[in-house]
Image (cartoon, grey):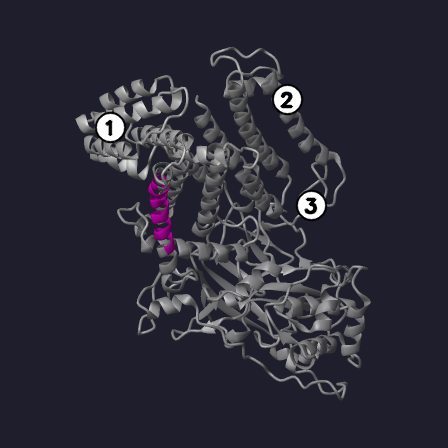
C-alpha cells in the first residue's frame, strides 16, 4: 500500500473515530454508517486524482465536488439535475433541511430523533471535517495539525452528550488520530532511511498492539516500534487516569442512571428540556404546526395540552423525578385528591400529530381519563403521563383522549383541607441554597391572605397583572441558585421564568407545587378544529388542593388564559391594594402556522388542506415552506457556482503565472543572469512535456531528454529543432568553463509547447490546461525558494 493511500485511509478512520462522539446525540447510529461510506468514497476520489495528477490541490477540489455530489444524491436526489447534479432546487432543499435540522436541535432533548435535517448536518459535517483532515494530513503532510479539526468534531459530541460511555468515544477518536500520526511517521522514517525493505518481516516485539499496528503499516524498525509504544501508553493513561480521579459528576467508577433522568422501567426515554426547547420554539421565526385537534370542550381556550410535570426543584431549575412506569390501563385511575363533591365535565378530544413532530411524551389534556393510541406507550401514574417505549414517538400519530376535567369553585379551593402529609412533604421541598429573598417576596405579596388558595391567586395576579413584569423571550434562562431571585429583581422573562418562580414561591409558603410543560390551546380554525404550533409551547405551575387535585394557574402575562376559578376569589379578606382579577381568555397574537400558509398558496407540503366546505381536517406538515427557508437560496447557489468556477480556473491561472515568470522579464545583463534564465526555460520545457503526459526523467542528459520528448510527443520538424536548440543552450549553461553570452531560448520553448499541443488529443489538451501535472512540483519549488 502506497504512502498516499495509507494516509488517506487513516484520515478516514480518524474522522469516523472522532465522529463517534456524536453517536449519543441522536437515536441510532445509522447516520454514522452512512457518513463513513460517503467519506470513504470522497477520500477515494482524492486518491484517484493524486495517482494521475501531481497537483495536490486538485485532489482537494475533486474531493469537495465529490462530497457535494454525494450529499445531493442522498438528501436532494428528487431536486437535482439528473438526480445527481446540484442546481438551484437542490440548494433550496439543502436550505430547507438545514433550517429544519436547526429547529429540531432546539426542540428535542438528547438523544434527538434522526430527522432528515439533523442527518444532513451530521453527515455533511463529517464530510467537511474529513475534507479538512485529508487536506492537512495527506496534501500538506501535516498529520499533527490535522488533529485540530478532529478535536473540534470530538468536542461537539463530548460537550453535549451525557452518558457513561464517553471514554469509548474518546478512545475511538484518539485511536484514529494515533493511526494518522503513525502513517505519517512511517513515511518520514522511510524517506530518511530508518525503514527497511517493503517486504521485510516485522520483529515479534511490541505485543499485540505493536503487532496489529505493524500489520496495518508494514515494516518499521526501532523508531517506529518505540513511537507505537509511546502512543499506546499515552492513550491508555488518558483513558485510565480520569476514570479513577474524583471529579464533579463522577467518572467511570461513579454509578449512573439513578439521577440522570434517562433510565426508566420498560425502556429508555428522553425528558424534554424546557429551558432550551421552550425558548427556541418561542423564538422561531415561523409558527410550525405540530398538532391539530378537535374537542367537545365548551371552552377550548382553557384546554392546555400537557406533556410532562417537573417536580424536582434544586434551586436553579426544575426537572422530572425518576419514577416507575407501567402498562397503559384501559381506564386511568381517578386523579389524586379529586373529591366527588367537585363538579367534573367529561371532554373528548381527537388529536393528530404532524409528521415532523417527534416527542417521547404524549401531549394530553389534564387529567386524562382514558387514552386510545397505537404504538408502544407506558404510563407514569404520578404525573399521569404517557411515555414512548423503545423509540416510540408522536410523529404522525392519531389518538383520542377522554378527560375528566374538574371545575372547582373558589369556595371549594378556599376551604380545601390539608393535603396528605407525604405529598405535602415531597412537593414543598426547597433547597437550602434558595436565596431568602424568594420567600420574603412571597410572604410580602400574599400578606393578608387567609388561605392557600388566596395566596396562590395573589401570586398569579402579581406576576400576570400588578407586579410590573414584562414578557420577553430573549432574556437568558439562568441556571444557578440565584436564577429565581434575579428574575424577581429584573422582572423580565418568559413562561419558564414565571412558572418556575411562582412554583418556587408557592413551595416556600407551604403550598405543594410543580411545573407542567406542554402547549396552550392553540388557534381555532375555520373548520372548527384547533391548531397548535411551535409558538404555543408553554410552561405553567400546578398547585395541589385537596378535593380538586393538581390545579392549573397562569402567571405569565399575555400568554394563555387564566382559569375561571382564579377570578372568583371572594372579596372578604382582600387587601386594599390588591389588584382586582378579571377573566382573561386572550392570548398574544401569533403568526398562523405554516401549514395553513402552504394550503393558501396551493402547495401543501403534507396531508390534506382545508376543503371550502370544511369537511376535512387540514395538512399537518411541520416543515417550513421552500419559499421562506431562512437561507437565501439564489445567493447561496450563485456563491456555490462562483466557487466552483474559481476552483476550476485556479490551476490554469497559476500555471500561466509560473510560465510567465520563467520565460518573461527583462533582458539578462550578465552571462550569469542569462544562464539562470536558460535553466528556468529548461524547467518550463520539462514541465510542459509533463503536462502533456511525458513525466521528467532526472537520469537523462538534456540531449537524451529532448530525444525522448521528440519521440513520445510526436513533434514535427520545427518543434523538434526548437527542442534541440533548447538542449544546446542548457548544455552550454551547465558545462561551459565560464558562462558565455547566449540568447534565452524562450521562443523555442513556445514552439515546443505549440508542437505538443497540436500533436496531443483533445482529452490530453484539456488535462494539460485544467489539471497540469507539473503544478504541484512548481508550487513546492516556489515555496522552497521563498
Task: Tell me the element at label 3.
Answer: loop
Q: Earlier in the sequence, mark 3 or mark 2?
A: 2
Quadrant housing the N terminus: top left
Is residue 430 among the parts visible in the rendering? yes
Identify which residue is drawn at 55% across, 62% down.
280
* The one of 448 and 420 positioned closer to us in this rendering: 448
Residue 229, disc: 2
Q: Which residue is mark 3?
A: 258
| Residue 19 screen position, x and y as percent | 53, 40
Q: Nearer the viewer, mark 3 or mark 2?
A: 2
Crowdedness near tag 3: few (<14), some (14–19) or many (≥20) residues, C-alpha within 10 Å:
few
Q: Which residue is mark 1?
A: 722
Classified by dominant secondary structure, the portion drawn in magenta counts as helix
Task: Tell me the element at label 1.
Answer: helix
Identify which residue is drawn at 63% across, 26% down.
231
Instruction: Please provide the residue range marked out in magenta.
Output: 639-656
- Magenta span includes 640: yes
Is residue 509 among the parts visible in the rendering? no
* Disc 3 and disc 1 in contact, CB within 8 angstroms: no
Amino acid at each position: 500500500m502506497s504512502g498516499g493511500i495509507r494516509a488517506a485511509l487513516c484520515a478516514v478512520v480518524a474522522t469516523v473515530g472522532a465522529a463517534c462522539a456524536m453517536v449519543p446525540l441522536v437515536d441510532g447510529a445509522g447516520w454514522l454508517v452512512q457518513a463513513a461510506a460517503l467519506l470513504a468514497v470522497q477520500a477515494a476520489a482524492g486518491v484517484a486524482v493524486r495517482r494521475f495528477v501531481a497537483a495536490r490541490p486538485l485532489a482537494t477540489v475533486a474531493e469537495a465536488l465529490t462530497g457535494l455530489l454525494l450529499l445531493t444524491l442522498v438528501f436532494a436526489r428528487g431536486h437535482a439535475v439528473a438526480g445527481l447534479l446540484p442546481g438551484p432546487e437542490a440548494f433550496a432543499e439543502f436550505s430547507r433541511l438545514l433550517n429544519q435540522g436547526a429547529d429540531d436541535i432546539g426542540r428535542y432533548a438528547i438523544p434527538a430523533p434522526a430527522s432528515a435535517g439533523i442527518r444532513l448536518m451530521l453527515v455533511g459535517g463529517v464530510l467537511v471535517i474529513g475534507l479538512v483532515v485529508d487536506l492537512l494530513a495527506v496534501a500538506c503532510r501535516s498529520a499533527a495539525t490535522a488533529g485540530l479539526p478532529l478535536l473540534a468534531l470530538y468536542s461537539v459530541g463530548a460537550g453535549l452528550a451525557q452518558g457513561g460511555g464517553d471514554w469509548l468515544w474518546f478512545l475511538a477518536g484518539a485511536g484514529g488520530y494515533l493511526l494518522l500520526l503513525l502513517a505519517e511517521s512511517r513515511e518520514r522514517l522511510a524517506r530518511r532511511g530508518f525503514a527497511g525493505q517493503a517486504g521485510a518481516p516485522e520483529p515479534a516485539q511490541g505485543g499485540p498492539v505493536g503487532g496489529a499496528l505493524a500489520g496495518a503499516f508494514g515494516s518499521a524498525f526501532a523508531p517506529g516500534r518505540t513511537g507505537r509504544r509511546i502512543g499506546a501508553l499515552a492513550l491508555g493513561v488518558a483513558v485510565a487516569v480520569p476514570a479513577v480521579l474524583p471529579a464533579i459528576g463522577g467518572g467511570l467508577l461513579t454509578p449512573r442512571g439513578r439521577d440522570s433522568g434517562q433510565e426508566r422501567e420498560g425502556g429508555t426515554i428522553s425528558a424534554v428540556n424546557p429551558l432550551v426547547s421552550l425558548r427556541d420554539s418561542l423564538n422561531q421565526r415561523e409558527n410550525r404546526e405540530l398538532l391539530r385537534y378537535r374537542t367537545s370542550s365548551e371552552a377550548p381556550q382553557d384546554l392546555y395540552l400537557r406533556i410532562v410535570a417537573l417536580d424536582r426543584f434544586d434551586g436553579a431549575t426544575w426537572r422530572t423525578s425518576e419514577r416507575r412506569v407501567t402498562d397503559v390501563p384501559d381506564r386511568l385511575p381517578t386523579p389524586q385528591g379529586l373529591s366527588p363533591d367537585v363538579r367534573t365535565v367529561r371532554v373528548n378530544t381527537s388529536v393528530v400529530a404532524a409528521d415532523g413532530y417527534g416527542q417521547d411524551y404524549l401531549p394530553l389534556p389534564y387529567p386524562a381519563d382514558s387514552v386510545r393510541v397505537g404504538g408502544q406507550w407506558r404510563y407514569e401514574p404520578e404525573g399521569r403521563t404517557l411515555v414512548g417505549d423503545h423509540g416510540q414517538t408522536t410523529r404522525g400519530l392519531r389518538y383520542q383522549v377522554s378527560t375528566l376535567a374538574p371545575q372547582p369553585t373558589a369556595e371549594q379551593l378556599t376551604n380545601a383541607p390539608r393535603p396528605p402529609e407525604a405529598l405535602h412533604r415531597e412537593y414543598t421541598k426547597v433547597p437550602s441554597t434558595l436565596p431568602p429573598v424568594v420567600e420574603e417576596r412571597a410572604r410580602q405579596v400574599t400578606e393578608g391572605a387567609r388561605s392557600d388558595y388566596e395566596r396562590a391567586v395573589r401570586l398569579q395576579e402579581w406576576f400576570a397583572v400588578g407586579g410590573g413584569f414584562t414578557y420577553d423571550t430573549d432574556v437568558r434562562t439562568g441556571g444557578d441558585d440565584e436564577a429565581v431571585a434575579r428574575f424577581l429583581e429584573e422582572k423580565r422573562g418568559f413562561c419558564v421564568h414565571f412558572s418556575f418562580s411562582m412554583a418556587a414561591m408557592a413551595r416556600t409558603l407551604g403550598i405543594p407545587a410543580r411545573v407542567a410543560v406542554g402547549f396552550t390551546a392553540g388557534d381555532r380554525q375555520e373548520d372548527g378544529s384547533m391548531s397548535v404550533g411551535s409558538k404555543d409551547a408553554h410552561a405553567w405551575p400546578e398547585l395541589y388542593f385537596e378535593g380538586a387535585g393538581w390545579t392549573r394557574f397562569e402567571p405569565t402575562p399575555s400568554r394563555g388564559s387564566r382559569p375561571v376559578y382564579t377570578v372568583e376569589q371572594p372579596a372578604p379578606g382582600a387587601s386594599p391594594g390588591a389588584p382586582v382579577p378579571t377573566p382573561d381568555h386572550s392570548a398574544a397574537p401569533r403568526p398562523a402556522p405554516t401549514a395553513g400558509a402552504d394550503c393558501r398558496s396551493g402547495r401543501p407540503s403534507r396531508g390534506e388542506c382545508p376543503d371550502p366546505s370544511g369537511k376535512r381536517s387540514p395538512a399537518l406538515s411541520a416543515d417550513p415552506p421552500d419559499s421562506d427557508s431562512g437561507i437565501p437560496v439564489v445567493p447561496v447557489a450563485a456563491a456555490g457556482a462562483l466557487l466552483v468556477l474559481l476552483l476550476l480556473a485556479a490551476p490554469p491561472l497559476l500555471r500561466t503565472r509560473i510560465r510567465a515568470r520563467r520565460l518573461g522579464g527583462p533582458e539578462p545583463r550578465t552571462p550569469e543572469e542569462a544562464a539562470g534564465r536558460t535553466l528556468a526555460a529548461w524547467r518550463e520545457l520539462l514541465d510542459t512535456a509533463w503536462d502533456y503526459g511525458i513525466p521528467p526523467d532526472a537520469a537523462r542528459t538534456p540531449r537524451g531528454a529532448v530525444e525522448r520528448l521528440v519521440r513520445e510527443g510526436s513533434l514535427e520538424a520545427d518543434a523538434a529543432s526548437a527542442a534541440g536548440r533548447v538542449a544546446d543552450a542548457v548544455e552550454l549553461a551547465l558545462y561551459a568553463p565560464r558562462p558565455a553570452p547566449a540568447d534565452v531560448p524562450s521562443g523555442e520553448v513556445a514552439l515546443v509547447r505549440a508542437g505538443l499541443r497540436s500533436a496531443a488529443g483533445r482529452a490530453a489538451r484539456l488535462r494539460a490546461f485544467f489539471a497540469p501535472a507539473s503544478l504541484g512540483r512548481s508550487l513546492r519549488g516556489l515555496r522552497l525558494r521563498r
